Image (cartoon, rainbow, N blue to C red):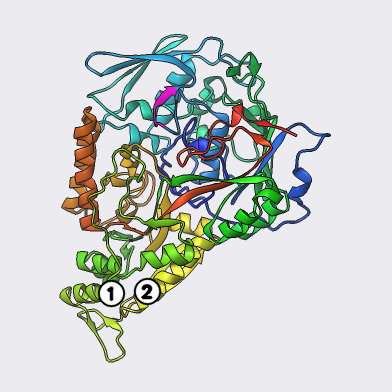
Amino acid sequence: MRLSTYSHSIPKWLKLRGQRLPLKSTLALAIVTAMVITGCNPAMLKSDASQPPQIVLAILEGPKTFNPVISQDKTSSDVGGMIFAGLTEQDPFTGEIKPSLAKSWSISADKLRIVFTLKENLKWSDGHPLTADDVDFTYNQLYFNEAIPTGMRDVLRIGQSRALPKVRKLNDLQIEFTLPEPFAPFLGTTGTGILPAHILKETVEKKDKDGNLLFLSTWSVDTPPGKIPASGPYKIRNYTTSERVVFERNPSYWKKEAGNQLPYIDRVVWEIVESTDTFLLQFRSGGLDSVFVYPEYFSLLKKEEDRGNFTIYNGGPNYGTTFILFNLNTGSRNGKPLVNPIKSRWFNNLKFRKAIAYGIDRQRMVNNIYRGLGEPQTSFVSVQSPFYYDGLKGYDYDPEKARQLLKQAGFKYNNKQQLLDDRGNRVSFTLTTNSGNKIREGMGSQIAGDLGKIGIQVNFSPIAFNVLTNKLSNSLEWECVLLGFTGGNEPNSGANIWNPDGSLHMFNQKPKPGQTPLQGRKVDPWEEEIGQLFIKGARELDPEKRKAIYAEIQTLVEEKVPFIYLVNPLALGAVRNNIQTIEYSALGGAFWNLEELKITE
């Protein structure tokens, strides 16, 4: 699982096939950051008779690397999803795991041995054969390599021992995975992209002058695209910093339809756009072929469907979560606490967190910010997932109950109705989010106003993507953030969030390998319990028993409030009518089958 920043104009199929990295220590906040449009007119990129068929989409920030294994931003991971296929892929309507690079697989009676058989005659875009050597290399030398920071290990660690599967090549077309114990989510993890051994093998055998693997500096954004072979339907054509990423069809792509080589559309352009407002302007002017429909734009775009020759699709409740969370980390680094000890006492007080949850008016967010196109959110499991537990109570807006909880926790009010702690300190904290996302900026402003009504001063401060990323994954010095995670049907995709040592255990984050260690970091028993329940849930193969385990986890998360969930919006997307044939879903979006789509006149 990875952090989301509402960059839904990028095809959601990237989450379903190819690179489904859980975002290593990765804060793939896909933020609405900025392109100042200098000499770049997206309308000039529209398809016409003089150029091959293409789709123009929008992203909110350019990639930081073309190496998806070590990427720490969402766009970089999404580039990996465009160009690298996995052994399997997921059906966006049923959630079923289907073949991709693999033709088939067999599972032993004890569920511990899975043998994948690859399709015959697979090739990389440079013409080199794609074989079981690449699968063996990708897992054993990249994902399982402790010298390479990647969150894939979090998702593939199995059971109490946190052991990794053993991966072994049997022959050129077959690869064997041996598990230490039954692991129900296993097939869903094999959609992760396979990378080319013939290009990258040398980079894990040699080190630079500082003793780091060359792999860690391989495939920067300055790398000539011809040096990055693809196995997916597209390969990188070029990247212009702060302007666009252009993909072109992979001539060696294995998939065909009725004898026709796929993909049908020759080129995909990702325009780097400044803000959601600019998204709207460029889509309405014809410069973009699809756009995520933000609530404030829905009424306007709905009126323009016929004139603009596009359709707004509704996939139902969106997968993923939006939340605020407090930094519960009690650790210090080099003698300096990550969080002011006064505020850390507040944040680690359960009644304080519950009071905050009761103090936020989610229904007003739905009505005003989301224009009624959503509902209050209660769980980290997506509503459309079969593992969603509908018995949660949630935290309905109740400012009086919030005040009572605060008083029970030892807080008090002065004659100005400002909240003070038991030592007389004014209760105030900084709430941050990614700048440029109007929805989140609106939510943050409302949260500050709502909590002001119960005497809490919230200093809301949207900040740049790279600054926020550094706070969350490196310095670990922050107080409260407003963010989101992508979602899916399988709860275990969030194992790296709920394992106390996981790379996205954000509310009490352990430093990454190589970072300065912490002193005094504590893990509460309930954190350990949730981590153990995730192990139990992954071990259980009976769907109904698994569902009961995840219901227990959701109940415990609601009780301990490490995340304060906010709003679950509808998944809405606008797509030009000349793109055929769109099958829209909340899980897959509009472009999950991009290689099969056609552009008509």
Question: Residue 588, relative to residue 121: is it above or below?
Answer: below
- Quadrant of res 279: bottom right
Q: Looking at the picture, how far across and down is residue 381, in whole percent? A: 32, 45
Q: Which residues are magenta?
A: 94-98
Look at the numbered discs 2 and 1 and tell me whether their residues touch, using CB distance below 8 Å.
yes
Q: Which mark is residue 473?
A: none
Tell me the amino acid under the disc marked 1.
Answer: Pro
Is label 1 in a helix, a strand or a loop?
helix
Q: Give the farthest residue toward the top.
A: 171
Question: Residue 49, relative to residue 363: is it above or below?
Answer: above
- Whether 514 is among the magenta residues is no
- In this view, the residue in front, 121 or 153, is 121
Q: Which quadrant of the rendered structure holds the C terminus?
A: top right
Tell me the amino acid under the disc marked 2.
Answer: Asp
From the viewer's perspective, tell me whether residue 43 is left or right of residue 504: right
Q: Which mark is residue 450?
A: 2
Instruction: Report the number of discs.
Output: 2
**Residue picked out by circle 1:** 399
